[in-house]
Amino acid sequence: MKMKHIANLLFEVRILKDIKRSGYAFLGSGKESIAEHSYITSFICFAMAKIDPDIDSEKLVAMALVHDIAEARTGDFNYVEKKYSMVNEAKAISHLIKHLPFGNDIKNLIDEFNLSETKEAKLVNDADQISFILELKKMADTGAKGPEKWLPVVLKRLKTNTGKKIAQSVMETHWDEWWMNDYSE
């Protein structure tokens, strides 16, 4: 294995820190890079794996880490942009993995995520939505306008009982409650 290919992959994944998610422009507030989104999605999956011990935790977290990796090449297309432009994720992934000995592992995880048929894929898809719910809830709690329109839409996207339970708890918790827990001077 040539380490140069690994270095190139790491630089490519690193660019996700610089690519902003495009949907926030329609909300009028908020911002997030693809890397920030992928991190919180992966951490949500880590927590999900602890809730349900029958889950393949390594697959769950790995799938979350790579679920938006193609966006290093395609950018982040929101639902409006997708009406007018075609994203060739398969081509982007094939180019990204071309020189990697573990490239098929990345492709297989992304394919499984996109098909959303396995328990792990359904959970990662829910974690993907919960990541957005966390952002919307924080914005709503801090007085931003717009999240109240999107929260019901995103909540309806959830498919698993675990995802729905986590989202319900998120909705019942103020975004900064953790900060004041056990506060004393």
Image (tube, helix red, strand yellow):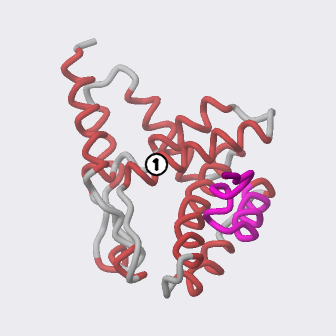
Q: Position of residue 85 (x, y in %)?
A: 28, 73
Q: Quadrant of the N terminus?
A: top left
According to the picture, the residue beneath numbered tag 1 turns out to be 38
Magenta residues, as a range?
163-185
Q: Is residue 43 above or below residue 129?
A: above
Asked if residue 109 is positioned above or below residue 156 in the image, the reply reads above
Q: Position of residue 129 (x, y in %)?
A: 58, 62
Question: Is 166 situated left or right of 61 in this image?
Answer: right
What's under tag 1, amino acid-wise? Ser
- Residue 32 image-quadrant placement: bottom left
Give the x, y percent position of residue 102. 40, 23
Give the residue drawn at x 61%, y 49%. 124
Side (left or right) of 89 relative to 121: left
The structure residue drawn at horizontal position 48% and vertical position 45%, both measured from the top left corner, is: 39
Q: SS of the residue at dot 1?
A: helix
Residue at the top extreme of this rendering: 1
Per the image, is 172 magenta? yes
In the shown orientation, is residue 149 left or right of residue 75?
Answer: right
Q: Residue at x 41, y 72 (%)?
A: 30
Q: Is residue 91 above or below residue 23?
A: above
- Residue 140 in which image quadrant: bottom right
Q: Residue at x 77, y 53 (%)?
A: 162
In the image, residue 167 lies in the stretch drawn in magenta: yes
Give the percent coordinates (x, y) of residue 163: 72, 57
Q: Is residue 5 above or below residue 85?
A: above
Q: Residues within 10 Å of mark 1 (few under 14, many from 20)?
A: many
